[in-house]
Image (cartoon, rainbow, N blue to C red):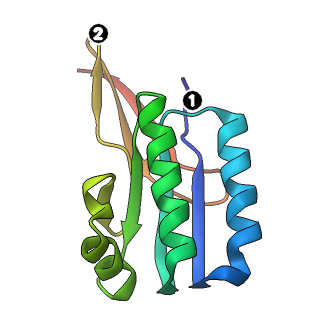
Amino acid sequence: MYDHPPLVVLEGVIDLATKPSLDGALSELERLNAPDVLVDIRDVTLLTAAGLGFLAVASARCADRGGGLYVGVQPGCAHRALVLTGLDAAMTIQVGSPSLPARGTRGHRREIVEAGGEDGPASQDYAG
């Protein structure tokens, strides 16, 4: 399992013009085979069907690997698009930075302290 799940950051207008980049991101996520993926759409100003499709496919692939898609949003049009399409039921939507929930593993828990930054998500291990 990964110490740090992959983080995909989307910004600005996400439409048909960005589809090749989205397809590339999906290919990279498939190559990594990580069960959990973080997606930050806090700076998305317009989320069209291309972006919604990317999130739907990424969510399904995470679910197939026993994980989940964690999407960080700001209140606004991108968040509304996820709710109106029902995609919010297929992924975990979080206002602010996307992060994984704390998970217990045989008395040991990993807590995500910060999602993002140059070195990826920071985490802290401690016995619980």
* Residues at marks 1 and 2, CA–CA distance in whole angstroms: 17 Å
Instruction: Estimate the x, y position of residue 53 in percent, counting from the top left.
Output: 52, 65
Q: Is 69 rendered above or below residue 18? A: above
Q: Which residue is mark 2?
A: 106
Instruction: Estimate the x, y position of residue 11 in percent, counting from the top left.
Output: 59, 80
Q: Which residue is mark 1?
A: 2
Give the side of residue 49 with respect to residue 97, left or right: right
Instruction: Estimate the x, y position of residue 5 in percent, counting from the top left.
Output: 54, 41
> Looking at numbered disc 1 in the image, what kind of residue is underneath it?
Tyr
| Camera-nearest residue between 99 and 92 | 92
Observer able to see residue 100 = yes
Give the side of residue 82 with respect to residue 19, left or right: left
Residue positioned 59% across, 46% down in the render: 6
Residue positioned 31% across, 52% down in the render: 90
Helix or strand or loop: what does disc 1 sit on?
Answer: loop
The mark that comes first in sequence, 1 or 2, is 1
Instruction: Estimate the x, y position of residue 87 in percent, counting from the top left.
Output: 32, 62
Mark 2 neighbour density, 10 Å: few (under 14) some (14–19) many (20 or more):
few
| Camera-nearest residue between 114 and 26 | 26
Quarter holding the N terminus? top right
